[in-house]
Every structure is written in structure tokens, then in C-alpha cells.
Image: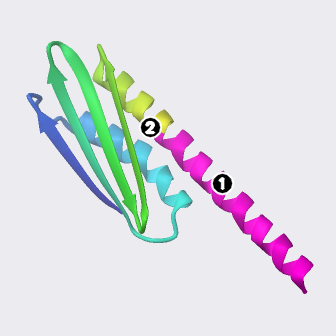
Amino acid sequence: MKLNITYRHLASTPSIEERITEKVAHFVKYFNESVEINWVCSIDNGLHRSEVNVHAGQQYFHAKAEEDNLYKTIDRVLAKLERQIRKKNKIHTQNKSQLEDLAMSIQ
């Protein structure tokens, strides 16, 4: 897993990096191949923003959130990403089982 954290108009702190690294670590279980995660934390007009791009093989996921607290944006973005990943995996599993059923009916 490769994690890049970028800060815009915001100072980097070990607690933010630690929290992001800790939360992102459990996404590895969803992917077989290497994962690249680009995370951007910023402040615009008093709002904290988090934006995440995840590249895993041919799969691509994107999520962003705005809140008055940076830690809330981290949690919200991770919830959005997990929803997207689970939905994609569910669709992939359903398609795979349908193809297996079709192959069995042809034989």
C-alpha cells in the first residue's frame, strides 16, 4: 500500500497522519493487488476538506467531504469509500456467480 498525504493551507501533524494511516490500513483487505491512495487535506473558507483517490489495479474510487472539523471529514470520507468498495465487490461477486451458473447450464 502506498499512501500519499498532501496538506493545503494546513500544517502537517503526526496525529492527523497517524489517524489517516490507521483508518486506511483496513482497506488493504478489499484488494489483491497493490493499492495507491492519494489523500488531500485542506481548509477553504473555514471549512475542512478531505479528498481521497484510491487506485487498485484497474479499479478507481474517489470520495470527498467538508465539515467544520478535519477528523469528521476523515471519518466521512472513509465511510463513503467503504460503501463504494463494498458495492463494487458485491456487483463483482454477483456477476461472477451468474457467469458460473451460466457455464454450468451450458455444460
**Which part of the image, by quadrant, shows the N terminus?**
bottom left
Q: Position of residue 73 (x, y in %)?
A: 35, 26
For the record, the magenta segment spans: 81-107
Q: Which mark is residue 91?
A: 1
Tell whether 1 sits left or right of 85: left
Picture residue at 50% right of the left edge, 51% below the top: 26
Picture residue at 40% right of the left edge, 34% below the top: 77
Question: Looking at the rendering, which quadrant does residue 58 occupy?
Answer: bottom left
**Numbered circles on residues, count:** 2
Q: Residue furthest bottom?
A: 107
Mark 2 in CB contact with mark 1 (< 8 angstroms): no
The amino acid beneath tag 1 is: Ile
Q: Which residue is identified by label 2?
A: 78
Number of other residues with Cα within 10 Å of mark 1, as a class: few under 14, some 14 to 19, many 20 or more? few
Q: Which mark is residue 52?
A: none
Q: Earlier in the sequence, mark 2 or mark 1?
A: 2
In this rendering, the label closer to the viewer, 2 or 1: 1
Residue 41, above or below 82? above
Of 75 and 94, nearer the camera is 94
Of 66 and 10, nearer the camera is 66
The amino acid beneath tag 2 is: Leu
Tell whether 28 sits left or right of 36: right
Picture residue at 71% right of the left edge, 62% below the top: 95
Residue 23, above or below 99? above
Question: Looking at the rendering, which quadrant does residue 66 occupy?
Answer: top left
Of 11 and 31, nearer the camera is 31
**Mark 1: secondary structure:** helix
Q: Position of residue 64 (x, y in %)?
A: 34, 33
